[in-house]
């Protein structure tokens, strides 16, 4: 569990990152909920077959990418994107990077998944 100061710093940086995004992405964020949690739950990690002691999950797109949708996807739960404060903050500490920069990379990584980009494509674009 994070203390209040890092949580507030993260949330303020996230608001700045979102405000700086192009208007098209603002519309997407109105349609696809962005959920921010301190850490991924053990059940979420287990469902993804990840060991949270070995892998830090910074974010997650949960849903069907736009490129894979068909009429069969009409009755499904809505997509969502998740960001995890703790892992992102620890990534910034390890790399001595910028909190806002890492939030932006992680958010755009998940947006990329929403639009159907895979991990290799995202790495080539600098969002891996």
Image (cartoon, helix red, strand yellow):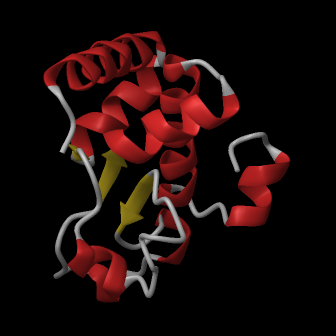
Q: Does 128 sit left or right of 10 as displayed?
A: right
Q: Does 52 sit left or right of 44 as displayed?
A: right
Please say whether residue 111 is visible from this viewpoint.
yes
Please say whether residue 105 is visible from this viewpoint.
no
User: Furthest residue to the right?
Assistant: 124
Q: Residue at x 41, y 81 (%)?
A: 70
Q: Whole-percent x and y of residue 1?
A: 18, 45
On screen, residue 79 above or below 84 = below
> Viewer-proximal residue, 28 or 109?
109
Q: Residue at x 79, y 43 (%)?
A: 125
Q: Whole-percent x and y of residue 88?
A: 46, 40
Q: Residue at x 34, y 47 (%)?
A: 84
> Viewer-proximal residue, 115 or 54?
54
Q: Does 83 sit left or right of 115 as displayed?
A: left
Q: Whole-percent x and y of residue 62?
A: 34, 67
Q: Does 1 sit left or right of 110 as displayed?
A: left
Image quarter of residue 74: bottom left
Image quarter of residue 47: bottom left
Q: Residue at x 51, y 77 (%)?
A: 68
């Amino acid at each position: 569990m994070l203390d209040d100061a890092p949580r507030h710093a993260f949330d303020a940086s996230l608001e700045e990152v979102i405000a700086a995004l192009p208007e098209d992405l603002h519309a997407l964020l109105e349609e696809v909920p962005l959920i921010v949690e301190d850490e991924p739950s053990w059940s979420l990690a287990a469902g993804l077959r990840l060991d949270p002691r070995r892998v830090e999950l910074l974010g997650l797109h949960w849903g069907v990418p736009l490129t894979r949708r068909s009429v069969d996807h009409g009755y499904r739960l809505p997509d969502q994107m998740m960001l995890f404060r703790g892992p992102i903050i620890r990534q910034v500490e390890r790399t001595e990077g910028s909190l806002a920069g890492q939030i932006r990379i992680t958010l755009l990584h998940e947006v990329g998944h929403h639009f159907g980009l895979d991990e290799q494509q995202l790495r080539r674009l600098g969002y891996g």
